[in-house]
Image (tube, rainbow, N blue to C red):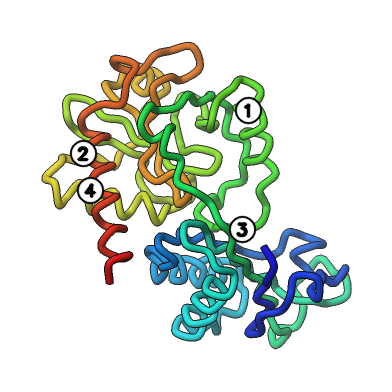
Amino acid sequence: MKWILRNQTILPRGETAVDIDDRGYQFGDGIYEVVRLYGGEPFLMRPHLDRLRRSAHELGMRADLDNGVLEENFRQLAEKEGVSTGILYMQVTRGVYQRVQEFPPADLPVQLTAYAKPMERPAEALRQGVAVWLVPDIRWLRCDIKSLNLIPNVMARQQAKEHNCLEALQHRGDMVTEGAFSNVFLVSGGKVRTHPEGNLILSGITRAHVLSLCEQAKISVDERAFSVNELLSADEVFITSTSNEVMPVVRVGDAVIGTGEPGPVTRNLQGLYEESFGMVTKN
């Protein structure tokens, strides 16, 4: 990673620095998005930018971010970095101001930072499936905002790592919400089920795309919360995220899901997902 986009200028990484008074540094007062690159092309860029704007609005942050300008800047960044398969990371903070807890003046310029880096698709995990770990959901009650405040997510992910699992699935009481960095789905009797949108989960861009693929494939979907026991007794489980696409879950803790192998509904959705980003790379 040699280049950084800072506001609307692409600079060598060594020429960029975070001001100590940046509110993202001081308070985590900012938002972010991660976009997949396939064949050098951003996938689902516009929905990601729309969600970035929504997060800004929910935090009372200036949202005068022009999608067209951002898209062009990010494409130039990926091209300059020479990334084919990878990610674009972008974040916006409320700006640089003396350290006060309340919001600074409304006309303070926000600070945009972005970079592109290679990241291969997790091919082996997508074929074989992964294990996940269950943890209590200790996050705040505005999980629908994609903010920089990720310490509870990081702590959950560390627990998963310590148990040789890819991801941590979170639950409030007995109700499963989502992964630390993913949305979670189960399949029972051929029907897909996932937690409904709301303040307890992030409205995932990959989640929404998979729901549209379910509609395309005439797979029945029930957006309704489910319990830990329902998760463990499901025929299939999968998680979705920008980096991990449609990832089969074959084990939750010590419990084997279904046959212990990725199931037919998950496989079908994986194929449809690959077709959809394959169309982008051909254009």
Q: Which residue type does callout 1 highlight?
A: Lys
Figure quadrant of residue 153: top right
Identify the residue at image location x=70%, y=84%.
109
Query: What numbered label is drawn on residue 268?
Result: 2
Figure quadrant of residue 136: top right
The residue under label 3 is 147
Q: Upstream in the sequence, badge 1 or badge 4?
A: 1
Identify the residue at image location x=88%, y=75%.
98
Query: What numbered label is drawn on residue 161?
Result: 1
Asked if labels 1 and 2 touch by Cβ distance under 8 angstroms, the answer is: no
Query: What numbered label is drawn on residue 272?
Result: 4
From the viewer's side, name the closer residue of 271 and 67.
271
Disc 2/disc 3 C-alpha distance (Å): 32 Å
Asked if labels 4 and 1 touch by Cβ distance under 8 angstroms, the answer is: no
189 left or right of 143 in image: left
Q: Upstream in the sequence, badge 4 or badge 3?
A: 3
Disc 3/disc 1 C-alpha distance (Å): 23 Å
Q: Which residue type does callout 3 highlight?
A: Ser
Asked if labels 1 and 3 touch by Cβ distance under 8 angstroms, the answer is: no
